[in-house]
Amino acid sequence: MEEYLGKSIKEVMTRFPAVEQVLDDFGIGCGPCSVGDCLLKDIVAIHHLSPQDEWLLMARIAGIIFPDQEIEIPEAPVRLKPDKKELRYSPPVRKLVEEHKLIKRCLALIPQILENADLETEPGRELVRLCVDFIRNYADRYHHAKEEDILFKYFPPGLDILQVMHKEHDSGRAHVRAVLEGVEKGDRSAVVENLLAYRDLLTEHIKKEDEILYPWMDRSFTTSQVGELFSRFGEVDGSFGDTGEKYREFIESLEEKFCRGRVSRLS
Amino acid sequence: MAFEGCPGSRMFDFRREEGAEEASLPKVQSQLRQWPVQLHLISPNAPYYQGADVILAADCVAYALGNFHQDYLKGKVLAIACPKLDDGQDVYLEKIRAWFDEAKINTLTVMIMQVPCCMGLLNLAQQALQQAGRKVPLKYAVVGVQGEIIEEEWATV
């Protein structure tokens, strides 16, 4: 088993596809991950299952990898998924989760933006450019900069999960470049394809961060580091002036336009 | 359910036989790095509070929590108070606010006992943070009467 604990989850799932379902049963959604570089042992550790669930998860995976070996699984009722207890974040991490909420509101608007953006007209092109401006300046420069320049620096750079996060940021940037190129060339299919791909990528990315990465990071931080992070994020917010407020108003204006404010009131 | 009096004063007896293991425990080194510690006596602008991670503990906490020095006080600075018996809590409020605004502390951890009256100390800290111009992460830990940590969370203000 040791050998497989040190392998990437993609490799394990490719050789033993049934492992994906087992992980899913425990609320570990590695299946749709576009990278899959994380090691099996790290995935088990990072999800912070109860000792009982962790043992059961490992037993079921071992049963798939070594089908001829006898694996005893307790018959007593066991919790198959972690408690759906509300996640409690430290104040600086909570700040990032709040920023995610505005990004998710933008992602939710992308189908309406695409539906209403006539790339043959300047107002239509401008609508897509404004969406890209939000993605580049709020989601990327303002938010991802806090993650890449500050938060991730508290952990070893070679950590698999961080490499996955960096790769997904880069993939997002590539989609955004392709959207802008599509706008300039009047290539509607490229704009639609890349903006929808960005939406799917970021939706999964944010879910991973909110539910797995951030809670794991929060468990690793000392009280002093939390204070330091809070202060450093505050400095970034200060240096960006009214960026947060400006883009909140932008999203609200789009929600008013396309959804008559319904999304804004629901979030 | 019959009224059993104030939960903060209710009597518990959890005496136990001292085991051989406990008898041979090494001496615990104090992690206290300053004096005074009582909230009425401290100056919030004392140099050791500047930029520090501060613990504001209810008086009973360090008696109940066996590893208070090693697990909580180490690397931090301290003040103690009793939200039930101490007078002049308006002075406390102002001193805690001064920690945030003037001493520019890094974090505040409020440690209270599980008894309801102790919640007043956390409320005081939250009120001071609301009044402060500078925001700081505020954590709280609730200690049981037998020294167990019942809850430890970051507070929302």
Image (cartoon, coloured by chain):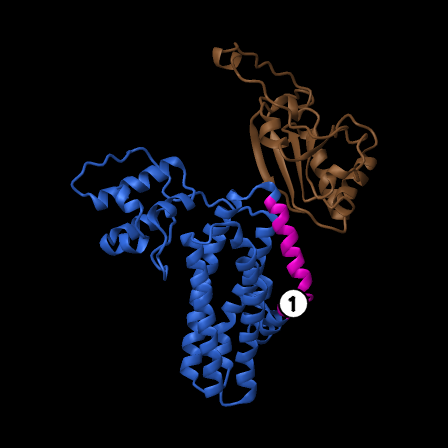
Chain colours: A blue, B brown
Q: Chain of mark 1?
A: A
Using the rendered image of the protein, determine whether residue A42 is visible from the camera's viewpoint.
Answer: yes
Where B44 falls versus A261 (above or below)? above
User: What amino acid is labelled 1 in the image?
Assistant: Thr
Work out which quarter of the rendered image holds the C terminus of chain A and state it.
bottom right
Q: Nearer the viewer, residue B78 or A132?
A: B78
Which residue is at 39% across, 49% downward?
A: A27
Q: Quadrant of the N terminus of chain A?
A: top left
Residue furthest out toward the left = A68
Left or right side of A192 for B61 = right
Q: Residue placed at 22% from the left, 46% from the top?
A: A65
Q: Where residue A52 sits in the image (x, y, percent)?
A: 36, 35
Q: Residue at x 58, y 70 (%)?
A: A137
Say whether residue A267 is visible. Answer: no
Query: Which sits in the foreground, B101 or A253?
Result: B101
The span picked out in magenta is A225-249
Looking at the picture, how far across and down is residue A241, in whole percent?
69, 65
- Quarter of the rendering containing residue B71: top right
Left/right of residue A110 with respect to residue A235 in the rendered view: left
Instruction: Determine which residue is flagged by label 1.
Output: A243
Residue B121 on image: x %, y %: 72, 34
Q: Residues within 10 Å of mark 1 (few under 14, many from 20)?
A: some
Spot occupied by residue A160 in the image (x, y as percentages of width and height): 40, 53
Using the rendered view, name the quadrant where residue B126 is placed: top right
Q: Secondary structure at mark 1?
A: helix
